[in-house]
Amino acid sequence: MNIKVLKNESEYKQALQEAELLMDSKPGSNEENQLEVLSVLIEKYEDEHYPIDMPDPISAIKFRMEQQGLKQKDLVPFIGSQPKVSAVLNGKRELSKEMIRKLHDGLGIPLEVLMSKSGSEDTEPDFSFADYPFFNEMVKKGFFPGQNSVREAKKIAQSLLNELFSVLGDMNVQQIYTRKSSQLQPTDAEALKAWQACVLHRVKGVNLPAFSTEIVQSSLISELVTQSREINPVKIKQTLNDAGIHFVILPHLEHTYLDGAAFINNTGNPVIGMTLRHDRLDNFWFTLFHELGHVFLHLNQDPTLSFFDDTESVVAKSADSYEREANEFSQNAMIPNNKWQEFISTSRPITENKVIAFAFKLGITPAIPAGRLRYESQYYISMNKLVGAHCVRDAFEDYEV
């Protein structure tokens, strides 16, 4: 529509429809500028033609909470963290475009109500330092390039957080967690989001070939399996990059329990991030192939998904179809199932020497079959000498991945 002063109800309704279509516009785009102008025109029309004021956004949210028996924690999926929910409901923070869209879609609050001004004079910026109690940890683990001092970083915390999360834009992603909230130590979703943002910053501006599952899957898997005999960060990264897949190593944040993740960046390339939380060869290779499973089986079907995996969690062994399929992909990629079953049935009692001979025959590191034996038997004190403990982080120490 042509943006102009709204003179009648028909133009008003058309403006509301157009505003809803523009809710997903990218920050700084012409569409976002159009949305801002439309919001002003809609508000002006409402002020002139609706003598009875509509409820302000906060009152509307609280009314819907009362209607549906919702508590503040129930608003986290729509607004963000618990501190953000509290700030919004107390008039300390204005609703962002993403919050408005989620509240409209999820709770059915009219768009025109959510887009009206709440009257708050004490608004906070999009990313508040108070929302990120793990900020110190982020600084120490290199989430903010050039910031080595926590004390100095705190002075410019707001700008650092704004820059970090700018890479996410209005990404419409569905975050899939291996680890479930019912466990004793629930996952910190905000920390995962910060970790993902940092990974995306690491690959920003890095141009890779277009990714195609049909072209690269068999050759890529074969090459990586061969590389397992001697871990080489440069070769691993180059092999994945040549296939159009970004590869990043970034330490996990506390309460994320994260081993690996897979998602799509804004250029359409898959990104695999790993934390090396468990410093063992068997975990490294299982996690890498697990994330490749998500890339080939799931992200190709739905690029809005983002997978975050605790690959040693009990949940991972009985999780939903996504995780079962990624597990099976990982196991079969490293050791074809028919060969594994043959080894299991003909090698009892299974000794370390038999595992080493089996690995040599397949041309892989003994850590892979040793780790699988531990995984399937749930007997994690066996094969300790073969799983490659305390050598992965050292291998990656001198490389920027």
Image (cartoon, rainbow, N blue to C red):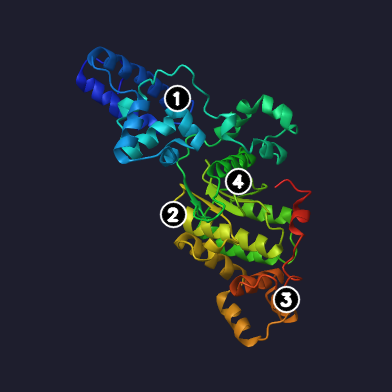
Task: Determine contact: label 1, label 4, CB under 8 Å.
Answer: no
Q: Amino acid at mark 2?
A: Gln
Q: Amino acid at mark 4?
A: Leu
Distance from the alpha carbon under mark 1 to that under mark 4: 38 Å
Mark before the other along the chain sequence, 3 or 4:
4
Q: Is residue 83 above or below residue 188?
A: above
Q: Which residue is mark 3?
A: 360
Q: Amino acid at mark 3?
A: Phe
Q: Nearer the viewer, mark 1 or mark 3?
A: 1
Which label sits on residue 94? 1
Which label sits on residue 301? 2
Distance from the alpha carbon under mark 2 to that under mark 4: 20 Å
Residue at 49% x, 25% y: name it.
28
Mark before the other along the chain sequence, 2 or 4:
4
Report the residue that reaches farthest toward the left: 9
Residue at 32% x, 17% y: name it.
43
